[in-house]
Image (cartoon, grey):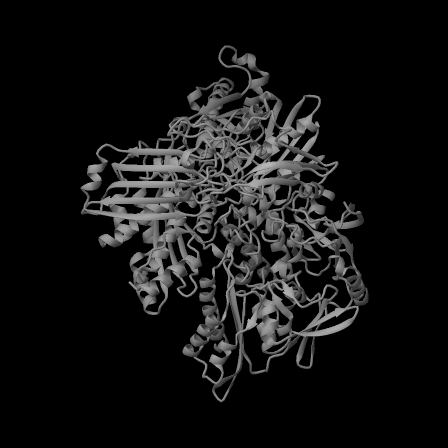
Amino acid sequence: MTAPTKGSGLTWVGRSIRRVEDPALLMGRGRFTADLPAAHRVRFVRSHVAAGRIENIDVPDGATVFTATDLAAVKPIVPALHKFGYVHVAQPVLAAENVRFVGEAIAAAVAATEAEAEDIADGVTVMISEMPAIIDGRAAMQDGAPLVHAQAAGNICVEGKVQTPGFAEAHAGAHRRIAVELRSRRQNATPLEARAGHATYDPISERVTLTCATQMPHLMRTAIADLLGMPESDLRVIAPDVGGGFGQKMSLVPEYVVLVWLARKLRSSVAWTEDRRENLMASFHSRDQHIRLEGAFDADAKLVALSAEVVANVGAYSCYPTTCAVEPLMAMAELPGPYDLRAYACLARGVLTNTCPMAPYRGVSRPVITLALERLMDAAAAQLGLDPVDIRRRNLIEKFPYTSATGLVFDEGTYRQTLEMASNALDVPAFRKRQAQARSERRYLGIGFAAFSERTGYGTPAFAARGMGVTPGWETVELTMDPSGYVELRIGASPHGQGLRTTLAQLVAEELGIAPERIKVVHGDTDRTPYGWGTFASRSLVIAGGASVMASRKVQAKLKTIASRLLEAASDDIVLENGAARVAGTDRALPIETLARAAYHQSHLFKGELDAGLSESATYDPAGTFSNACHAAIVEVDAETGGVTIERFVVAEDAGRLVNPMIADGQVMGGAAQGIGNALLEEIVYDDTGNMLTATLADFLPPTCREIPRIELFHLETLSDATLTHSKGLGEGGAIGAPAAVLNAINDALTPFGISINEIPATPQRIRAALRQAEKSPA
Amino acid sequence: MSKRNEITLTINGRRHAIRVEPRRTLVDAIREDCGQTGTHIGCEHGVCGACTVLVDGAPVRSCLMFAVQAEGKEIRTVEGLAKGDELNTLQRAFMDNHGLQCGFCTPGFLMLITGVLEREPDISDEELIDVLSSNLCRCTGYQNIVKAARAVAGEMRQQRTA
Amino acid sequence: MKPASFAYHAPKTVDEAVAKLAELGAEDGRILAGGQSLVPMMAFRMARPAHLIDINAVAGFDRLAVESDILSIAPVVRHAAFHHPAVAGPTGLLLAKVVAHIAHYPIRLRGTFCGSLAHADPASEWCLTAVTLGADIVALSARGPRVIAADDYFEGMMMTTLAEDEMVREVRLPLLAQDARHGFYEFSRRAGDYAIAMALTTYRVEDGVIVEPRVGIGGAEGRPRRIAEAEAALKGEKPGTEVFRAAGEAAAAAVDPLEDVHADAEFRRDLVRAVTRRALERAAA
């Protein structure tokens, strides 16, 4: 247990209290979707070719198999975006005429058990006339490339362009122009619980309850009801315990739509548990991008202009609600990163291919743009004869509010300070000595930095700028204190490991002066909670937290009024603490339960002043805030094998007020581990006909504990006014900076060989190939 | 569907009489036929370790055994660790050290650690971490899982030398 | 990912097991021992045996014993049996070093030495060990036992010279001489992953020079084998950095590397060079 934030005057906020979520999970009493029994199980028949026309579907006699023909009345998934020429591609929930990627669902086999459903699915024969498939993003834009969707010319689904006034002059007039080209290979978020859905039809109410692994229960309800043409009120969506999401469980899952349809058709319960192979092949992929940056620097190594070209391979369809434009357009909007830059130009394209559709994954495009920017900084430092820390020092933003070249407003942060903290922690001068010594022994050590911003806690104003058909952002909470003095907080956010039931309880406890154990946070059930946007984009603590504080303060005011009456004191003299209301400076107090009971059962005492009961709701919709961090890594590259070991990994981060430091640290460590996996191990590989070569966990390689070093954490807390709680989000940060820090360290280690590795994962094979090349033509 | 075998699985000391096809994996039998859903399925091909249970004291991947193979053996799952609602030492160490976030991989880790500490009480720190590399976690980054495991191993070591 | 249906048999004696295999081997009947390799294949439905013959309860199948200068390993001896030296002397130490690289702890508690040989995955550490140390594989069928030298046993990736109705009844591993040096080095992407390349080496030193060198390479080709060129580079030489480097080069030049999603031929060749040299350094240490 840690002490409250020093001098904060706070009781619960800032303390690492144990998580209320833990006991049930530790005892195996978690309730995950696949734990529910069902009368029917579904196994999907999936395409074995990447592109083709379905000619015939042959079903074994007596088998229950549904195809697109049966689901003709179900609308296709068509997320909307009204900017940058976005092409509105449509995805049928079961492939109708065409298949567009290996793994696309074609039919649903139904049986009493999963094994039997799989037997049936195996017996279904789908005749597909294969058509040429296009797999690579850049190749897909070439003349003559087969079209994934007829309406998207050149396979371009969206093309964003931006250029600040005076860019050309700033670019041309620069002292030095330095270019880097980065390749980020395809990722799969790989939550340990794959997706799962369970739909059950209740004949009395004629409603369906869909229990599913999702990050956005309310929006799933809206979307599915819409596609099926049913009233939303007839559909209840429950996100129970969810085993990780990382963004992959945000987007609408076509299979979930089929489940609800089946539940209504069969008037029964029907479940689908995605297996790992399906998840690797046919869930959502991310970050398959190519970025070219050219930085124009002045004589003082100040970045004066930046031009960027982004090609994102977004797969065969568009994810709902963000659309597949989210990666390229976010890259375009956020590429200037944390650097002071006025002249900026970018061309960002989302390109369709016959591969699994793309959807956001922790950080979305930020890990890739950070990778590119941080490689640029190191390349520029090398060419301009500067230390990598120094060149960043010269360029990081430090005056706030700072409005970026793309109009993003940065609130107070500590970009330079976290850079200094990280570099001091690693003692760069001492490291350089050690590095030189090691080199003389033919051992290759390197150090790498990644300074970056994290856009977090942003509400509708920010989302509205994107021009999506669905603009998320606000969060509503309903807070009820019942006559017993216990609190129920019903939220529209949807945590899946973030510990929000604990941290929100801490926020409410702080306002109401009661212990967090007396606050129950209810989430995930659309029947029990106000409409909300779920949990993603590092938003829930900030936005649901802010709304919780707002609602708490309304209740707090009411409790103080009640107390002032019962204690015959001025409202302003009432203090709520330790589960009671006390008149300041005296020992006259009343327990909270007494006040709560009075609110319901003695309402006549407050007639005219207060409504009966203690139930308030609040909605919070902030513009957003920026966290910042610097990651730094020391690695050793084994030149003979290309193997990379991380010797030290440091994170210096500032996410404003930490409500629960233990939980905050957990988010950073988990994110960094994914970032390290991204940098060294994880890659989805297709062959050139669109077959996936990495469809098992022995081929797609999330790291074990042996591959992840101890993450050393340092914190600053800038209490910006951008959010009500002075907290900023930080869920994604770990994943954003780690790849760049590791890649920069690898390159630093390999400096004696005169090569550059600008691709992740920086696998041993890629490193060895670069070294072999250098051996042939030594620097 | 082939014929079903009538078998009895003994889980956490309780006997469950069930009828299963030979191809029914132990993890599916534990979860569905015996109703103990604390053990989870993460990959079904023996890589992630989420399905780890103890069979006659050995931590094994229950997705790689068939239920018919487990008759007559003593199976222990996560549900057997706590005493009623009272968490055991290892569970408390996980809670104190924030060793879980979404909780999906947690039962597998708990049984892995329980099994290895019972079988190899003098396991070195390095070997313990090697054993922990058997299981995957996507949320925690492992640091706190390692902390919790080390804390319990250390405590056990102290108790033995005391 | 549920396996296809199969009929389950659990013989209690070796005769029963052999009879079952005689009856069912030709009808797609497979032996189930540890299951750590077979069951994942069945989950993917890459293997769909109509019958599984579970030999875990067969009397005497867990026998691990030294018979003069041979270590006799029966079908259900688990990998974990080698965690602590199974026999005094260098062989026990070598096997303990090698076993630490086989997958992970829980897999080693179930998987079996003989099962690895039957499965014949190119990345199997025990297959490399059998070939390098010159083991004999005793195959058993209703027609009786048959001894197959390791050199004649591996045909290619996942292919052996076992007949459909034969099981691996025993592996007989010759013990190393008391003064034998031994080294093992494996390269894999993550802890516990399949070896992309590995080297196992033994030699003795007589009058200051290397005699009886054995250099086995696994994970790099369809089957593990001793590399004569590498052994020739060592024989009669004083052990040392340059000699080991030469042996590594020889091994790299001699192999015809596999290509897969994890490694192309060039990279595997690089690894063969590195693992050979490092296994030799470890042997000399």
The one of B56 and A246 positioned closer to us in this rendering: A246
Side of A88 relative to A305 (left or right): right
The image shows residue C244 at horizontal and vertical percentages of 45, 76
C133 in relation to A27, above or below: below
The image shows residue A316 at horizontal and vertical percentages of 49, 38
Side of C239 relative to A718 (left or right): right
The one of C16 and A673 positioned closer to us in this rendering: C16
Residue farthest bottom in this picture:
C207
Residue farthest top in this picture:
A608
Side of A167 relative to A620 (left or right): left
Does the rendering let one see residue A728?
no
User: On the image, which quarter does residue A40 sit in?
Assistant: top right
Side of A313 relative to A45 (left or right): left
Could you tell me which residue is drawn at 68 percent across and 27 percent down? Answer: A265
C54 in relation to A363, above or below: below
The image shows residue A308 at horizontal and vertical percentages of 31, 41
The one of C125 and A572 positioned closer to us in this rendering: C125
> How many marks on residues?
0
Does the rendering let one see residue A695?
yes
The image shows residue C11 at horizontal and vertical percentages of 80, 61
